[in-house]
Image: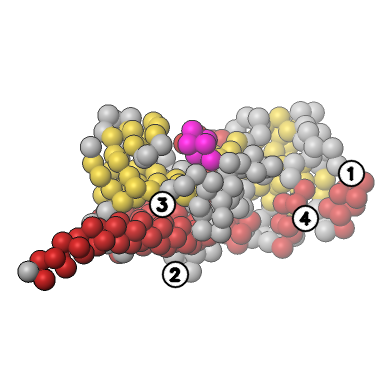
């Protein structure tokens, strides 16, 4: 069985940055990479100082090289389960033994049940104005059912249409949208109008097509936290795994970082969470190392003293 100080599950920004910090601290680290990052469909990422506009795949490629350059191991596999202790069982049959575990498995975006959304996802169907708003500035923008996006997006374009779809707008919400210059297209959305591999409009159930070039959607964020649940980590009232500011969970030796515990974390935020978790993890390991060293020292000291007297 392979022995590691830390096994990191998930090779996104949080997991790789944690591994980078830990390997530079000369810890033996394995990163399990299932190969399905959440932002894989995106061509570029933004809002990351010095990395603005970089392709997400390129960031991960550079990150993996940095981790392995310091002696970390990247394992292309998927974790099936983690036993208390911690034995990390991989789908390919390998089992890793770790002193500590960091789970950075992210989340999945659950989109509304509207035909065509998934196919256009991260292309001209988007969810984060801070990630993509500047790139679609001043274009005809639609917003599907999420009021706060409807109120936010006029910062990037004067031409915003809100589609309530199956959302019942209150009188206050309707007034706020109109006051922000947002047009409201009532009625259920039936699908998207696409021509030449580009979004051209939003189709309503009554047959109308509202011309739009971009559609913002608020997905439901579903954490990939099965491993944390299997370890017995406590959750909060929101159903998400609870952590302290360093990512420490309620289970001793288990940390979590990135979108698996914070759906709002962007790439740069997740990387920072990974760094904070790594420093806390190393401090925890140092505490254990010190206890072991003191115990060993106490066992050897009488023998050393007796030999000196002779």
Residue 271 coordinates in the image, percent (x, y) = 46, 59
- For image coordinates 46% across by 57% down, the residue present is 277
Label 4 close to label 3 by CB (< 8 Å): no
Q: Is residue 272 magenta?
A: no
Q: Quadrant of residue 220?
A: top right
Q: Is residue 216 left or right of residue 67?
A: right
Judged by depth in the image, the label closer to the viewer, 2 or 3, is 3
**Residue where numbered disc 4 is placed:** 151
Question: Which of the pair 236/148 is nearer the observer?
Answer: 236
CA gap, disc 2 and disc 4: 30 Å
> What residue is disc 3 on?
15
Q: Which residue is mark 2?
A: 50
Residue 230 vertical position relative to residue 219 in the rendered view, above or below: above
Q: Secondary structure at mark 3?
A: helix
Which region of the structure is painted magenta? Answer: 228-233
- CA gap between label 1 and label 2 equals 42 Å
Label 1 vs label 4, nearer the camera? 1
Tell me if residue 123 comes above or below residue 276 in the rendering.
Answer: above
Local secondary structure at mark 4: helix
Colouring mode (rainbow / by chain / secondary structure / one colour) = secondary structure
Mark 4 neighbour density, 10 Å: few (under 14) some (14–19) many (20 or more): many
Instruction: Give the residue drawn at x 92%, y 46%.
Output: 171
Residue under numbered circle 1: 170
Q: Quadrant of the C terminus?
A: bottom left
Between the C-alphas of marks 2 and 3, the distance is 20 Å
Q: Position of residue 284 (x, y in %)?
A: 41, 58
Q: Mark yes or no: residue 67 visible.
A: no
First-in-chain label (1 vs 4): 4
Q: Are marks 1 and 4 in contact (CB under 8 Å)?
A: no
């Amino acid at each position: 069985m392979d022995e590691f100080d830390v096994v990191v599950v998930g090779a996104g920004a949080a997991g790789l940055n944690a591994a980078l910090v830990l390997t530079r601290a000369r810890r033996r680290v394995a990163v399990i990479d299932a190969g399905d990052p959440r932002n894989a469909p995106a061509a570029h990422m933004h809002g990351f100082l010095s990395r603005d506009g970089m392709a997400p795949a390129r960031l991960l490629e550079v990150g993996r090289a940095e981790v392995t350059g310091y002696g970390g191991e990247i394992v292309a596999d998927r974790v099936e389960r983690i036993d208390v202790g911690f034995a990390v069982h991989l789908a390919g049959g390998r089992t890793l033994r770790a002193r500590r575990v960091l789970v950075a498995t992210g989340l999945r975006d659950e989109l509304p049940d509207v035909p065509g959304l998934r196919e256009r996802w991260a292309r001209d169907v988007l969810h984060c104005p801070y990630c993509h708003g500047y790139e679609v500035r001043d274009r005809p923008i639609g917003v599907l059912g999420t009021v706060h996006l409807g109120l936010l997006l006029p910062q990037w374009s004067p031409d915003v249409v809100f589609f309530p779809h199956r959302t019942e707008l209150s009188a206050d919400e309707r007034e706020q949208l109109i006051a922000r210059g947002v047009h409201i297209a009532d009625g259920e959305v039936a699908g998207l109008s696409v021509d030449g591999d580009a979004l051209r409009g939003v189709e309503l159930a009554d047959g109308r097509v509202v011309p739009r070039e971009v559609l913002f959607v608020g997905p439901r964020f579903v954490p990939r936290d099965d491993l944390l649940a299997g370890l017995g980590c406590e959750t909060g009232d929101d159903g998400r795994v609870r952590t302290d500011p360093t990512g420490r969970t309620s289970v001793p030796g288990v940390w979590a970082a990135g979108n698996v515990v914070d759906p709002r974390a962007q790439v740069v935020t997740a990387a920072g969470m990974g760094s904070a978790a790594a420093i806390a993890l190393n401090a925890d390991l140092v505490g254990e190392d010190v206890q072991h060293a003191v115990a060993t020292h106490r066992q050897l000291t009488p023998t050393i003293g007796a030999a000196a007297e002779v």
